[in-house]
Image: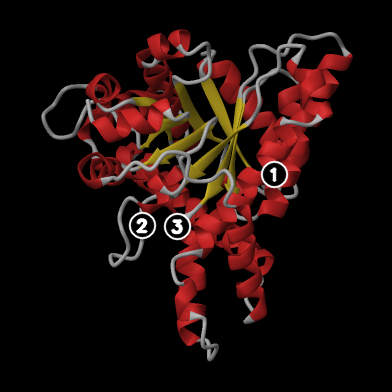
């Protein structure tokens, strides 16, 4: 087992894999199986998204027989996709069952996302989340709900109903604060009815690399003398400030009331942690975001980079909030508003998931004929 990956885990940051396919669930010699990643690389969870499923289903022959059988039964393309993705996630949940039990339900989690086309529709998000929760029927499942304005009431409702969620596409501390508030409101609504809280778990997926990808070109185009010194710093600073808010809530009286009732805090999950700029250290969005009660979900390429060249330096977040705020203030001083950046990235993030989803529907329709 990798020393660095083990150190990250021991420091309180759970390592999840940002990938899922049928190849991952068998030993085929082409890609590392989930079993080997669990036993050898400290991987204790899996996240998925529409782009991952589109690539998996479209490029693998392992889905062909099921696809043909479902098409022969008269299933539509979207129904076929639901059956295939739910089947994969259920099997992955079963593979992580021992991790789930040994971690007390904290890890061993597998995520599945609601249709990205529902990102601006509260009721459709709630309805499909309920259907996915019921169909997969695994206690270690997380339903991914987008952190749009319309997604916030969906988060509150689903948590109040006892459905564990992975809130995704978060780009700013302001939206993260709203997400954590919606999660707590859901628990409070449940507690008001004397319903149990202990089995509900949640993570808030705060996206990292895309922030630097958006801001770096603006810095390079800036006439400010200090702009270039900020290259590659915005994303981690943004995440550090989100974690500062997390610590504040964790220590609040409001949270302590729920904790005494057995509630589990919604953990920050660092997503999109593979670097986009080849000039950057491929491990920077992992090693710079180690802290207690976190999750880092990474593609295998990043996992391998951390394993081979990651330098563990302990808790990389707590106590660095003044520096992080300084970076964000410097950006504002040269005309880069982190909230405007976050709004742009949210719009683009939804589009980036809708496009592969529509492509997958088209591919399944073609194969069904």
Of 351 and 33, the residue lying toward us: 33
Label 1 sits on residue: 245
Q: Please tell me which residue is depicted at 71% across the width and 41% down the height of the picture.
A: 179
Distance between the Cα atoms at labels 2 and 1? 25 Å
Q: Please tell me which residue is depicted at 57% across the width and 29% down the height of the picture.
A: 143
Q: Secondary structure at mark 3?
A: helix
204 vs 359, left or right, is right
**Quadrant hosting residue 329:** bottom right
Mark closest to the chain's N terminus, 3 or 2 = 3
Q: Secondary structure at mark 2?
A: loop
Question: Looking at the picture, how far across and down is residue 191, in whole percent?
Answer: 83, 15
Mark closest to the chain's N terminus, 1 or 3 = 3
Question: How dense is the environment of label 3, judged by Cα within 10 Å: few (below 14), some, or many (20 and up)?
Answer: many
Confirm or deny contact between disc 3 and disc 2 (CB under 8 A).
Answer: yes
Circle nearer the viewer, 1 or 3: 1
Q: Quadrant of the C terminus?
A: top left
Distance between the Cα atoms at labels 1 and 3? 20 Å
Label 3 sits on residue: 209
Question: Looking at the picture, how far across and down is residue 221, in whole percent?
Answer: 48, 86
Residue at the left extreme, as displayed: 29
Distance between the Cα atoms at labels 3 and 2? 6 Å
Question: Looking at the picture, how far across and down is residue 328, in whole percent?
Answer: 62, 66
Answer whether residue 35 is visible to the viewer in this image: yes
Determine whether 315 is above or below 227 in the image. Answer: above
Label 2 sits on residue: 275
């Amino acid at each position: 087992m990798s020393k660095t990956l083990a150190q990250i885990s021991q420091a309180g940051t759970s390592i999840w894999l940002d990938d899922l396919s049928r190849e991952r669930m068998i030993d085929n010699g082409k890609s590392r199986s989930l079993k080997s990643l669990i036993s050898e690389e400290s991987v204790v969870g899996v996240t998925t998204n529409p782009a991952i499923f589109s690539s998996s289903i479209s490029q693998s022959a392992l889905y062909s027989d099921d696809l043909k059988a479902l098409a022969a039964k008269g299933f539509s393309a979207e129904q076929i996709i639901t059956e295939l993705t739910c089947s994969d996630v259920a099997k992955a949940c079963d593979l992580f069952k021992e991790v789930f039990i040994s971690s007390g339900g904290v890890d061993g989690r597998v995520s599945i996302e609601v249709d990205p086309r529902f990102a601006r529709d509260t009721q459709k998000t709630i309805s499909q989340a309920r259907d996915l929760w019921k169909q997969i029927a695994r206690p270690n499942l997380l339903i991914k709900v987008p952190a749009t304005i319309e997604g916030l009431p969906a988060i509150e409702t689903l948590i109040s109903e006892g459905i564990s969620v992975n809130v995704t596409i978060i780009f700013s501390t302001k939206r993260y604060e709203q997400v954590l508030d919606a999660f707590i409101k859901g628990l409070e609504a449940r507690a008001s009815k004397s319903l149990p809280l202990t089995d509900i778990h949640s993570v808030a997926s705060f996206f990292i690399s895309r922030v630097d990808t958006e801001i770096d070109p603006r810095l390079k185009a800036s006439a400010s003398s200090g702009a270039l010194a900020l290259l590659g710093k915005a994303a981690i600073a943004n995440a550090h400030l989100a974690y500062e808010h997390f610590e504040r809530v964790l220590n609040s009286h409001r949270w302590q009331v729920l904790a005494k009732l057995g509630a589990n805090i919604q953990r920050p999950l660092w997503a999109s942690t593979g670097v986009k700029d080849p000039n950057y250290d491929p491990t920077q969005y992992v090693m710079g975001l180690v802290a207690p009660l976190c999750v880092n979900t990474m593609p295998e390429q990043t996992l391998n980079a951390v394993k081979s060249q990651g330098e563990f330096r302990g808790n990389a977040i707590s106590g660095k909030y003044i520096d992080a705020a300084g970076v964000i203030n410097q950006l504002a001083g040269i005309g880069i508003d982190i909230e405007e950046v976050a709004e742009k990235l949210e719009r683009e993030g939804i589009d980036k998931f809708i496009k592969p989803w529509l492509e997958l529907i088209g591919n399944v329709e073609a194969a069904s004929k």
